[in-house]
Amino acid sequence: VHIHQSFFQRLLKCCSVSYGRIAAGPGEYGSNSSSDADDKLVVHPFVPLSRAHEVISQLTPEFATLPEPERPVSPRALRRAITRRAIFQGGGFWLAVSACICAVCVGLLRTVGAITDADASFLHVGIASLFILAALIFAVEVIGAVLWYRRASFGVDARCVVLVNGGYSVETTFLPRTKIQLAGTRSNPLQRHARVATLFAKSAAGVGGQKERLIDVSETDAALWRDWVRPGASGRL
C-alpha cells in the first residue's frame, strides 16, 4: 500500500492512495518494459491525509491497524544526504563547477587575445548568472535533503512494515510481512565508516518484483530489522 504526497498535495494536506499489484507478464499490452506507474493501482487520487487510513481499512480490512514510522534514520544521515543529493548528485554544484571552468577559459582566451575585453565582459555576466542559478539550485537541493532527513523513518508491528521516504514529496509504503520475498541490509565502505546501513525489502509487486528501501539507518536498527525479517522470528522488534 502506497500513500503519496506531492509537494502541492502536502500544502493542501491531501494524498493519493495506491496498491502495488502483480503483473501477469513482462509488461502490459505487449510491451517489454514496466514502469512504477504500471505496477501500482491508484484507488484514490486525491483524499485528505487524515482519511487515508480510513480508505485503506475500508478497502482492505487486514490493514485496519498499521504501524507508525517511529524509527528515524541515523543522525549521520543528514550529512550524508546533503553530500549525496547536493554535491555528488547535485545539479547546482556541478553547474558551479562548469561555470568555474568557463570563467577560466574566458580568462585564457582574453589573455591570448582571442576575444576582446567587451566580449569577455559580456561572457562574465553570463557566467555570473550561472553562479547565481547554481547557488539557487544548491539551496533547493540542500533543503530537499534536510526534508528527507526529517521524514525518513520506518516502523514495524507483528504483521507489517512501514517505510517513509521523500523530500519535497513524501512516499509512505506499507508492506505486509507475509508478502516480503527478500529482505535484508547492505552497506558500502562509506556507510560502514559512518556506522549506517541500507535496509531493503522486495515484494512480488510488478513484473520482476518491487524493492523498497531506506538509506542510512543506524547499525542498531539495521540489526533489529534483520531479526524482524528472519524466517521464524516473532515479528516484533
Image: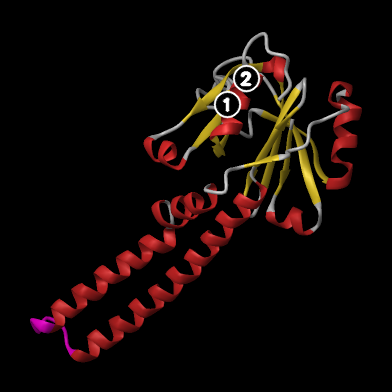
Colouring of the image: secondary structure
Quadrant of the image occupied by residue 115: bottom left
Measured in 3D between alpha carbons, the distance from the residue under mark 2 to the one under mark 1, in whole angstroms, is: 6 Å
- Return the mark for residue 199: none
| Element type at mark 1 | helix
Question: Which residue is at a point 59% across and 56% down the rendered structure image?
Answer: 146
Instruction: Pick the residue in front: 112 or 220.
Output: 220
Query: Which stretch is magenta?
Result: 111-116
Question: Which residue is at a point 52% across and 26% down the rendered structure image?
Answer: 185
| Element type at mark 2 | helix
Tell me if I can see residue 167 in this picture: no
- Residue type for callout 1: Ala
Q: Is residue 237 left or right of residue 187?
A: right
Above or below: residue 57 compared with residue 113: above
Question: Which residue is at a point 69% across and 23% down the rendered structure image?
Answer: 21
Q: Quadrant of the N terminus?
A: top right
Tag count: 2
Q: Is residue 211 left or right of residue 101?
A: right
Mark 1, Cα crowd under 10 Å, few <14 / some 14-19 / many 20+, is some
Measuring from the top left, give residue 187's x and y in whole percent.
Answer: 45, 32
What residue did someone put label 2 on? 227
Mark 2, Cα crowd under 10 Å, few <14 / some 14-19 / many 20+, is some
Q: Is residue 126 left or right of residue 196?
A: left
Measuring from the top left, give residue 80's x and y in whole percent.
Answer: 47, 49
Circles 2 and 1 in contact, beta carbons < 8 Å:
yes
Measuring from the top left, give residue 163's x and y in whole percent.
Answer: 67, 35
Above or below: residue 212 compared with residue 7: above
What residue did someone put label 1 on? 223
Q: Residue furthest top?
A: 232
Tell me if I can see residue 140 in this picture: yes
